[in-house]
Image: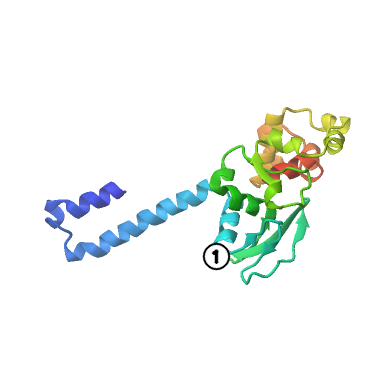
Amino acid sequence: MEQLVARWAHNPKVAGSSPAPATLPILIYLYVVVIIHFKKRLIKMMSNRNQIIIESAKRGYIVSELGVVKGLRKNILKLTVAKGYYCFTIRFGLKNKGHGVYVHRLQAYQKFGTKFFEEGIQVRHVNGNSLDNSFENIQIGTHSENMLDIPKEVRIKTSNVAWRKANPRTEKERFEIYKLINNGLSYSQINKRLSVSNGTLSYMKNISKEYRVFSSN
């Protein structure tokens, strides 16, 4: 598209050595179309959760070194707990819809930038306390590293026989199911793709602590 605009602007057969006044509105229109097109592609490439973090940072929400969240007026925000993590809500978009901002993700963005958006990277709570969002406690790493931050007794409890019977799948297979759940697919749609029963999907989504860790990163 950009090459087309450039060729149109400088083709002597069309506009001489420079764009004619009559072609300027058209060129401006095409330029705007190109910008909008690439902006839409960029938005599609970036997950909705990452957009929420970037938007909250742009608006001036910050997490202190102690993990305290300050709002637009530098006031301390009142936080809620969702899926075992502190969060707050901001509104943006055409419908001014409310979006939950996880504090540990915002702290990670402040500390590591867009590096923590990379595929396979998750936010870690080094001391195993998911409510401690202090600067020193927040790191990034792989899923395996993240799981090791969870206290040993908790890891053993979540790896019980009931879980194995309900979910006799490899880590890669489970993560694929988690992605489909996060993408909003219904149980029936996932069942058709991967032959997973509704009961197993319900267990994975609503009970599995592994899914909570996965969906919060």
Which colouring convention does the figure follow? rainbow
Q: Position of residue 58 (x, y in %)?
A: 54, 61
| In the rendered image, the vertical position of residue 21 relative to residue 174, given as above or below | below
Which picture quadrant has residue 144?
A: top right
Q: Quadrant of the C terminus?
A: top right
Q: Would residue 185 be seen by someone viewing this image from the given angle?
A: no
* Residue picked out by circle 1: 94
Q: Would residue 134 be seen by someone viewing this image from the given angle?
A: yes
In this rendered view, identify the residue nearer to me: 69 or 216. Answer: 69
Q: Position of residue 48 (x, y in %)?
A: 59, 52
| In the rendered image, the vertical position of residue 18 relative to residue 189, given as above or below | below
| In the rendered image, the vertical position of residue 70 relative to residue 197, given as above or below | below
Amino acid of disc 1? Leu
Specify few, some or many for label 1: CA neighbours under 10 Å numbering under 14, 14-19, or 20 or more: few
In this rendered view, identify the residue nearer to me: 12 or 202. Answer: 12
Q: Position of residue 98 (x, y in %)?
A: 65, 63
Which picture quadrant has residue 165?
A: top right
Query: Which residue lies at the image location 67% right of the left edge and 59% below the top edge?
Result: 64
In this rendered view, identify the residue nearer to me: 26 or 69. Answer: 69
Q: Position of residue 210 (x, y in %)?
A: 76, 39
Query: Which residue lies at the image location 51% right of the left edge and 49% below the top edge?
Result: 44
SS for callout 1? loop
Q: Is residue 182 left or right of residue 17?
A: right
